[in-house]
Amino acid sequence: MMLDVNGTPAYAYTGGNAFDPSRPTAVFIHGAQHDHSVWALQSRYFAHHGLSVLAVDLPGHGRSAGPALRSIGALADWIVALLDAADVREAMLIGHSMGSLIALDTAARFPSRVTKLALLATAFPMTVSDTLLDAARDREADAIEMVNEWSHSSIAAKPSCPSPGFWLHGANQRLMERVAERGEAQLFHTDFSACNAYRDGVERAAALQCPVQVVAGRRDAMTPPRAAHALIGAMKQAGVTVDTIMLDAGHALMSEQPDATLAALFSFATRSA
Amino acid sequence: MSANRFDTLVLHAGAAPDPTTGARATPIYQTTSFSFRDTDHAASLFNMERSGHVYSRISNPTVAVFEERVAALEGGVGAIGTASGQAALHLAIATLMGAGSHVVASSALYGGSHNLLHYTLRRFGIETTFVPPNDHDAWRAAVRPNTRLLFGETLGNPGLDVLDIESVADIAHANHVPLLVDSTFTTPYLLRPFDHGADFVYHSATKFLGGHGTTIGGVLVDGGTFDFTTTDLFPEFTQPYDGFHGMVFAEESTVAPFLLRARREGLRDFGACLHPQAAWQLLQGIETLPLRMDRHVANTRKVIEFLLAHPAVEGVAYPELESHRDYALAKRLLPRGAGAVFSFDLRGDVAAARRFIEALSLFSHLANVGDARSLVIHPASTTHFRMDAAALAAAGIGPGRIRLSIGLEDPDDLIDDLKRGLKASQKTEGSRP
């Protein structure tokens, strides 16, 4: 559905069911150069199992109007504005990669609006190499190709996603290309720069007040599991309950292990506090 | 992990050791149906909340390996295995449009495709305008407000017209419709149409993909390039579909709403699915595709060299020859070779062509191409027999036109066989053997 967020049209996929703000809500936040469709299976399942779903297209991505926002903090503010626009008082936030930082920042700064936090393929710092940043700025096609290769751990992930017969490398490559076509110039660079510049991760992790789930891919070459240690340590030190799940997957957790990702997220979402 | 190079993908894409048994080769999942873990699992599979297999008409693990492998080789986002190449063509058209729609197609098509478009689909309210494949103005002029697809073959029947994919794709996209390409003759080893702007590709996998003349099958590949949301011509993808719980396919998948609808509607309702055993046989062929295609092309070049020098041959139509009108285009699009199917004109009439075919022993006389064995056919009396003399002449098919599909035999043996045929063809009635 389309929402008006700060006077700008924003799209959120509602999982094939009409959005109902009176039900518990889960907000799915995609990563760099992606859109809502990376959550197709998990969000659709949530929407048909008692939750309301907002799988967003971040500003300037997919169907949401730009401009793209240039910092994780601004994107977190946007998530709260989106909740306001959808008349949602509080929600569970689920973020992948860049989306995990947005979810983290939102949950820490707006604790009354976030019930639970699921961080998939997260890292802090989420450093992006100069080589990749330069490619994203000057040679976007090369950057897309590099990231696509690093995102997958297999050329035979089963049962594939969103259905058998999909070639995940091709689908992810084309999605990033489509987001680039629809978005403003150098969108990938904008996203990566926001990740690279984010400095508040540990501080925000220590300020969390809600339960957290961290889902990592054992063979993730983009955000390897060890890259989440600093965040997890800060959360635990602050007394936050952290549930860590390790999946046999690369960075593209939702497509390489759609069922295991769903099982982790749904059990966390429906678990009593 | 890198998506690997072509010669690796032919062996590995889509297939890992079987998680249950460890079987290294892809098992044949010879089953109609798949057990559900519980009622919720069942419901979520039916409602596309999970990926997985329900019933082998919709998907099957062996078929999925075949689909994912061909998609990987083509550089697409996914694929659907079908009962035949014709089923793949029908699935593409039936997914994109309904009665009242229009297709612009190359006039240089496989006879079966021509039949489907010109006769059968017209009965269902879908009309086709045929245009010469490389007449760009004709493509443009044929587009109507109800046009929903442009369609051609990478190498068109029977003169091997090379489709200028980039130019025709530009015309399609300027009119907000996709381009579908039949890539059967070239396979992704020789040409990947998505690299040049095509949106959908299909194969009669029966031919070079399978490669051994054993198995009928097809595959429809989605390049993921056509954005249905930029036009109002395709409500099938952008509006709720009552036939699947109000699903809006373009919201479910940003890059492959076509593939989702083709499987969830087309396979479900038309049912022209690929059999898992056929998928397995086709996979065996694909594993050696690069090796075979190199040999097919090398043998073809040797045979053509022989034919060009033979006095009983009036001409050979092959895009690698400077005499072919698409020579320059072939050089650009087909650097690895222009395939292994071509036609030549025998000096003489229909009777000469018959004598030629009947004198051959290695070449098999049958209606197929892309076998490991070499094949021969006389189009005027077989594949194009419905066309009258005027139509044959318009299509450039003379009475002595012979089509060959060059196999993997020793090329010198093929040439010896052709020598016998050519000698027989030039004998007059009543002359001594």
Image (cartoon, coloured by chain):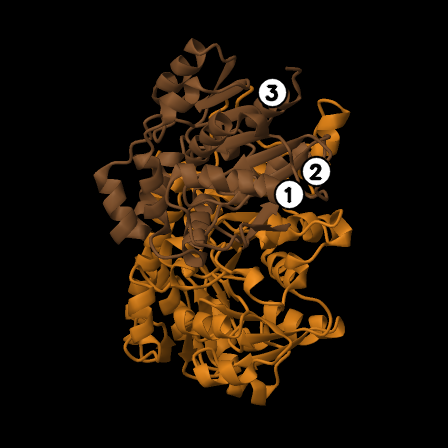
Q: Is residue B217 something that shows in the picture?
A: no
Q: Quadrant for residue A249, please give it.
A: top left
B317 or A41, which is in the foreground? A41
Residue at 41%, 74% in the rendered image:
B167
Measure how far apart labels 1 and 3 are at the Cα level. Answer: 23 Å
A184 or B213, which is in the foreground? A184
Dot 3 surroundings within 10 Å: few (below 14), some, or many (20 or more)? some
Q: Which mark is residue A21?
A: 2
Q: Position of residue B325 (x, y in %)?
A: 35, 80
Numbered disc 2: secondary structure? loop
Task: Give the colour chain A carries in the figure.
Answer: brown
**Is A18 displayed left or right of A95 in the figure?**
right
CB within 8 Å, label 2 to label 1? yes
Residue at 38%, 74% in the rendered image:
B423
Q: Is residue B380 something that shows in the picture?
A: yes
Image position of B338 with respect to B128: above or below: above
Dot 1 surroundings within 10 Å: few (below 14), some, or many (20 or more)? some
Residue at numbered disc 1: A86
Labels 1 and 3: the sequence-earlier one: 1
Q: Position of residue B365 (x, y in %)?
A: 52, 63
Q: Which mark is residue A268?
A: 3
For the C terminus of chain A, the image quarter is top right
> What chain does badge 2 belong to?
A
